[in-house]
Amino acid sequence: MPEVIQLNERELYIAIGKLFASFPSTARRGANLEAYVEALSRIPTSFVQDACDYAVSGRIGDGKSIPPAAELAHLARTLHVRTLPRTRISENYVINDPNQRKSIIQGFKGLLVDLRRGKMIDPDLATTRVFGLKRDQEDL
């Protein structure tokens, strides 16, 4: 019985096959199809296809031979990362007075003691205890 290949794996083989077909056999010397599949299999296929298009058009590598699998994978990952939403680091700084700081440190110490003892921790309640919040302050 022939091995069943998933659709995106099939598309990956097609993209890499087109890449291999675009370069003469002398330019593919040492290139192993399975190594390319392994290097690119965890990256969404559309970005692999884009990376292969870059290679075929000579925009990566030397343009005369097939780029190494690692270089192609790096480009595909870079293309993928560019499409991910950017997370913004909060610029809201909190400055606690010495009494608040002391209270928070004590809260964390209490939490660590509970964790070391294997006590079940409710995350909401732990936050309230660590920061010394009252229930009505929690949503601020």
Image (tube, helix red, strand yellow):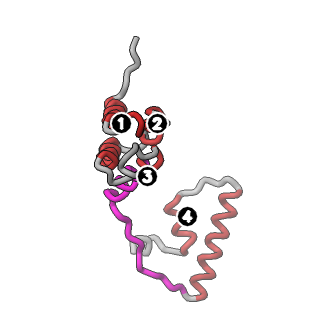
Say which residue label 1 marks.
24
122 part of magenta stretch: no
| Three-letter residue code for mark 3 | His
Q: Is residue 8 visible?
A: no
Q: Residues within 10 Å of mark 4 (few under 14, many from 20)?
A: some
Q: Nearer the viewer, residue 26 or 108?
A: 26
Residue 107 to residue 125: above or below: below
Distance (Cα) linking label 3 and label 2: 21 Å
Residue positioned 42% across, 80% down in the render: 92
Where residue 74 is drawn, which disc sits there?
3
Q: Position of residue 30 (x, y in %)?
A: 49, 36
In whole angstroms, how far apart are the C-alphas of marks 1 and 3?
23 Å
Are there few (<14), some (14-19), or many (20+) residues within 10 Å of tag 3? Answer: some
Residue placed under numbered mark 2 in the picture: 29
Which of the 4 quarters of the picture holds residue 136? bottom left
Neighbourhood count class around disc 1 (C-alpha, 10 Å): few under 14, some 14–19, many 20 upward = few
The residue pinned by badge 4 equals: 126
Contact, CB < 8 Å: mark 2 with mark 1?
A: no
